[in-house]
Image: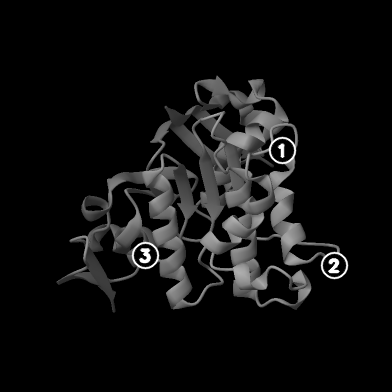
């Protein structure tokens, strides 16, 4: 199955924010959304998540338009991690992650009592479980919210279904080591059949871990395809206006890197 969009056009204040005739993204793959600031990456992610009510009929998940989904059922099938995650009250970390389990209150997991700790462990934040959220660093808060969305789409053994994670700059607040830890985690989730869409600004990070990239410009998809084919110096210069070159050195997956001037 897939997450699809047809004639996805979003206009606000006479400005076209999205203009995408067709899009089909397969589950079990890591899709990286790339592009300069203002290209429409976060807007597209929000539209695919169902935040833009005017285009709900244009987006389909599991073959059903988002407008046909029950709110709680949709929350069990997909989770959105936005850039900003304000927490107005003084919750502790366990409370924050437990919020992700709210859509499942009528269908508790057999290991429900353990899932918060499991999600924190996966996000590398279990040691923070008893901390007050407001006292955490930016990177620690980011990992806690990653654990929250992991808990939200945690697979139920009696109700197997396709699951999606939509993440807006999940590595932005993280140090180098945690960036790679999170990207390896996302790769592992795709092996379990989870569909992942992540907005990223680090082109090399996308090239190292994504199955495919979608390069956006002015609300449109400029180029979409395999990382090795798409992430070429000519495209980077045309879209970002930055000169770079390909390096012959490759990572363990056999993927190349770009060096920026």
* Image height of 180 relative to 51, above or below: below
Q: Residue 158, percent across and down?
A: 56, 29
**What residue is pinned by disc 1?**
103
* Residue drawn at 40 percent across, 32 percent down: 24
Q: Under tag 1, what secondary structure?
A: helix
Quadrant of residue 107 in the image? top right
Mark 3 or 2, nearer chain start: 2
**What residue is pinned by disc 2?**
90
CA–CA distance between discs 3 and 2? 34 Å
* Residue drawn at 34 percent across, 70 percent down: 242
CA–CA distance between discs 2 and 1? 22 Å
Nearer-the-camera pick, 26 or 177: 177
**Residue 50 visible, this orientation:** no
Q: For marks 3 and 2, give the one nearer the viewer.
A: 2
* Image height of 21 relative to 47, above or below: above
**What residue is pinned by disc 3?**
205
68 left or right, relative to 212: right
Quadrant of the drawing holding the N terminus: top left
Neighbor class of circle 1 (other Cα within 10 Å; few <14, some 14-19, many 20+) is some
* Residue drawn at 74 percent across, 42 percent down: 102
């Amino acid at each position: 199955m897939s997450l699809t969009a047809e004639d996805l056009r979003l206009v606000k204040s006479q400005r076209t924010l999205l203009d995408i005739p067709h899009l089909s993204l397969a589950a079990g793959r890591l899709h990286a959304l790339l592009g300069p600031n203002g290209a429409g990456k976060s807007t597209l992610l929000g539209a695919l998540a169902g935040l833009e009510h005017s285009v709900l009929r244009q987006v389909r998940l599991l073959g059903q338009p988002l407008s046909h989904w029950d709110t709680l059922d949709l929350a069990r099938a997909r989770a959105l991690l936005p850039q900003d995650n304000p927490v107005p009250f003084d919750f502790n970390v366990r409370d924050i992650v437990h919020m992700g389990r709210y859509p499942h209150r009528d269908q508790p997991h057999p290991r429900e009592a353990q899932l918060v700790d499991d999600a924190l462990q996966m996000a590398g934040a279990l040691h923070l479980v008893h901390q007050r959220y407001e006292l955490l660093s930016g990177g620690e808060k980011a990992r806690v919210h990653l654990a929250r969305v992991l808990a939200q789409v945690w697979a139920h053994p009696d109700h197997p279904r396709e699951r999606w994670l939509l993440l807006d700059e999940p590595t932005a607040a993280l140090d180098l080591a945690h960036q790679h830890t999170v990207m390896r985690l996302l790769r592992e989730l795709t092996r379990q059949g989870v569909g992942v869409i992540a907005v990223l600004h680090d082109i090399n990070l996308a090239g190292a871990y994504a199955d495919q990239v979608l390069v956006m410009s002015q609300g449109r998809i400029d180029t979409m395809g395999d990382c090795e084919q798409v992430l070429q110096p000519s495209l980077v210069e045309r879209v970002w206006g930055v000169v770079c070159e390909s390096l012959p050195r490759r990572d363990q997956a056999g993927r190349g890197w770009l060096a920026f001037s």
